[in-house]
């Protein structure tokens, strides 16, 4: 189990989170900053969150997290984090339906040179263990407090599309991916079938599992119609340096020739080739309008593909990433 921590800010305070709330080890947290007396706080094994208060908002605070056992402190270096105890707006928040590329974008953006030459900090699904129940409960202000307290510049996470009123950032990027690929990739991942926090946060829709996945793609993207400052298609970002440059400009980041990583290579294809005629009709009925807006010409493409003989299963499974 990884011993990792995350800090979010309040004005004059910091909250230290275990990234995995199931990590149950007692720790000592050293708190140091210029102009204040250093102190050590106990982070009990049963605690998931530690509040550190009475901090000057102007200071950069260093937190040193180490084992409470003396011998282990000698053998292992402390985990160090630095943060300023002041809430602020994110530079950018990138969100979408899920299965749409937010993880790839976070990896691509993280470490790029910022305007001042410092490495840009981009993260994917920060503190999702804590945020998903709040999103599911519609606790807008609590979710917004997380967003305002993030210490990195850019957050990439699909779940914010379910509570768009909690989004607060200079640039709100909707990342959209062809609905056919999203729906099939979601089905591959067990949307509306498997148990777990990611499925519990999804709204229930009428119809079959397939129809619910279609409605989920439409629902999340329509939620972002009213808050997104920019929309980018994943396919354009993957194929076009010009599209990537436009995204960086929207985020206030200098141009970069770093290629976008390819992630989520899976065994099952993200294509609709194996859908039944009823599923293709359901997709067109539920998702057609949104597809027309962002993927004009998709209907002609689908008609050509449906007229072709279906490829062999082995060929399909090697054809596309999930």
Image (cartoon, rainbow, N blue to C red):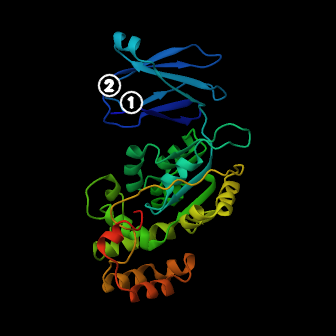
Q: Assess whether mark 2 and mark 1 are in contact (beta carbons under 8 angstroms).
A: yes
The residue pinned by badge 2 equals 25
Residue topped by disc 1: 3
Q: Closer to us: mark 1 or mark 2? A: 1
- Which is nearer the eye, 53 or 187? 187
Quadrant where the N terminus is found in the figure:
top left
Q: Residue 8 at what x, y percent from top left?
A: 52, 37
Q: What residue lies at 61% left-to-right and 16% top-to-bottom?
A: 36
Vertical side of 205 occupied by 139: above or below: above
Q: Nearer the viewer, residue 220 or 267?
A: 267
Q: How crowded is mark 1: few (under 14 residues within 10 Å), some or many (20 or more)?
A: few
Image position, residue 293 (x, y; %)? 56, 78
In the rendered view, tell whether residue 41 sits above or below residue 98. Answer: above
Q: What element carries label 1?
A: loop
Front position in the image: 321 or 184:
321
Secondary structure under tag 2 reads loop
> Can you give x and y, in whole percent of width and height, for residue 98 in the image?
44, 60
Q: Earlier in the sequence, mark 1 or mark 2?
A: 1
């Amino acid at each position: 189990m990884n011993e990792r921590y995350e800090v979010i800010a309040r004005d004059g305070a910091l909250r230290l989170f275990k990234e995995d709330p199931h990590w149950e080890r007692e720790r000592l947290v050293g708190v140091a900053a210029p102009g204040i007396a250093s102190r050590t706080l106990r982070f009990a094994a049963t605690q998931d969150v530690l509040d550190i208060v009475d901090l000057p908002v102007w200071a950069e605070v260093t937190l040193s997290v180490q084992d409470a056992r003396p011998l282990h402190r000698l053998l292992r270096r402390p985990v160090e984090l630095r943060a300023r105890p002041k809430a602020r707006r994110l530079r950018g928040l990138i969100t979408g339906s899920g299965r749409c590329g937010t993880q790839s974008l976070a990896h691509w953006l993280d470490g790029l040179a910022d305007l001042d030459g410092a490495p840009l900090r981009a993260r994917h699904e920060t503190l999702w263990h804590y945020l998903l129940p709040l999103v599911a409960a519609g606790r807008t202000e609590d979710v917004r407090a997380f967003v305002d307290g993030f210490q990195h510049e850019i957050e990439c996470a699909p779940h914010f599309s379910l509570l768009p009123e909690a989004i607060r950032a200079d640039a709100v990027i909707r990342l959209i991916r062809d609905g056919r690929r999203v729906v099939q990739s979601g089905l591959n991942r067990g949307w509306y079938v498997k148990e777990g926090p990611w499925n519990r946060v999804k709204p229930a829709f009428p119809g079959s599992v397939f129809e619910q996945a279609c409605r989920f793609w439409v629902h999340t993207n329509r939620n972002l119609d009213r808050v997104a400052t920019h929309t980018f298609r994943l396919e354009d970002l993957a194929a076009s340096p010009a599209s990537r440059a436009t995204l960086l400009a929207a985020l206030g980041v200098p141009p970069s020739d770093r290629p976008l990583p390819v992630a989520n290579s899976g065994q099952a294809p993200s294509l609709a080739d194996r859908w039944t005629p009823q599923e293709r009709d359901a997709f067109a009925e539920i998702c057609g309008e949104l597809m027309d807006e962002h993927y004009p010409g998709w209907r002609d493409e689908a008609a050509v593909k449906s007229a072709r003989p279906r490829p062999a299963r082995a060929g399909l499974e090697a054809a596309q990433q999930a």
